Amino acid sequence: MTAAPTVHRAAARSALQAGVLWALLAAAAFSTLGIWGKLAAQAGLPSDATLALRFSLVAALLLPLTARGVTRPQALRMLAVGGLYALATTCYFGALGRITAGATGLLLYLAPAFVILFAWLRGHVPARTQLAAVGLTAAGLGLVVGLPGPADRDPLGLLLGAGAGALYALYLMVSERWLAGQSAWTGTAFMALTAGAYFAARAALSGTLTLPATGAQWGAVLGMALIPTLVAVPALYGAVRHLGAARASLLGTLEPLFTVLLAAVVLQEALRPTLLAGGGLILAGAVLSQLRPGGGPRPA
């Protein structure tokens, strides 16, 4: 009579471990996005053109391998998921142009709070551990990426930053439901198709649609397509599938910590004294988010 519960606990533990590993891989891979973006800008490639090429290359690679057997309703749902990601990215860059990068990042990585809020509005009361995890990660993010200051008093910039966080949360929640039953590679392919077309249209309208002309430009684009897209996006979908949107998004707050550490290594950017304290709070929140109220890992 104890065999079934034992098997269930073992399966839950295995799912938890797999989900955490996928989430850590996604956060580490996504953390390189800013590095590749800076390298592309230094090489003289406009951001919309860079993003258009990033997603178009991924779509061109994956669609022939993954689109077979996908029904029209499935394709439309996956394309819609890509649309949410593209809109979240637009809000993020819009905020970045009006307020500081720290405040923009802080608002974006409050996505876990939006995930919990949206679930609460649907009748899913959050556990105390979830609320505590959000509080810890928010405090840690404030130390790592910086708190809003005098340069962050632009109302539209703050609204766009909050919109980026809310849209990213919605993207994760919709991915959890609409990508169920689809492989991570298929979801990535259709998301990249939508995002590639969207950013290509933006670049064309602004007159910045261009192909890389130098090795440095091609290197930045290919690096962005490979690590923070081909590696990060399927890993994120794997994390959401095993953990759910709320817990996966809380682990995703490790991304800015990885970014700061990577920037220190690659770009020789100085590490601030508050980094260790902020990183510790983010790690504590990430661990707490994976525990059930009674202690121990929560079954996925």
Image (tube, rainbow, N blue to C red):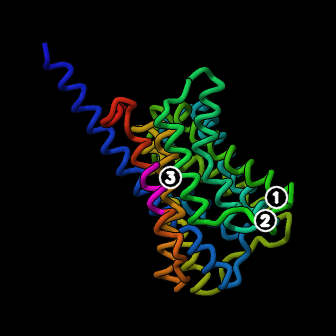
Task: Tell me if residue 139 comes above or below residue 272 in the rendering.
Answer: above
The one of 293 and 80 positioned closer to us in this rendering: 293
- On residue 67, the disc is none
Q: In this figure, which residue is indicated by the disc labeled 3?
A: 252
Q: Nearer the viewer, residue 252 or 239?
A: 252
Q: Marks 2 and 1, how far apart in space?
A: 6 Å
Residue placed at 52% from the left, 35% from the top? Answer: 176
Q: Amino acid at mark 2?
A: Ile
- What is the quadrant of residue 142 in the picture? bottom right
The residue pinned by badge 1 equals 157
What quarter of the picture does the C terminus occupy? top left
**What residue lies at 65% left-to-right and 54% top-to-bottom?**
108
User: Label 1 sits on what residue type?
Assistant: Gly
Q: As drawn, is 149 to the left or to the right of 139?
A: right
Indicate the position of residue 143 as horizontal and vertical percent values. 58, 64
**Residue drawn where x is 67% and y is 66% of the image:** 102
Three-letter code for the amino acid on which mark 3 is drawn: Gly
Q: Position of residue 85 (x, y in %)?
A: 65, 49
- Start and end of the magenta stretch? 279-285
Query: Label 2: which residue?
Result: 99
Q: CA distance from mark 3 to mark 2?
A: 22 Å
- Residue 251 vs residue 52, the one in the foreground: 251
- Is label 1 in a helix, a strand or a loop? helix
Query: If the image is split into quadrants, where does the N terminus sit?
Result: top left
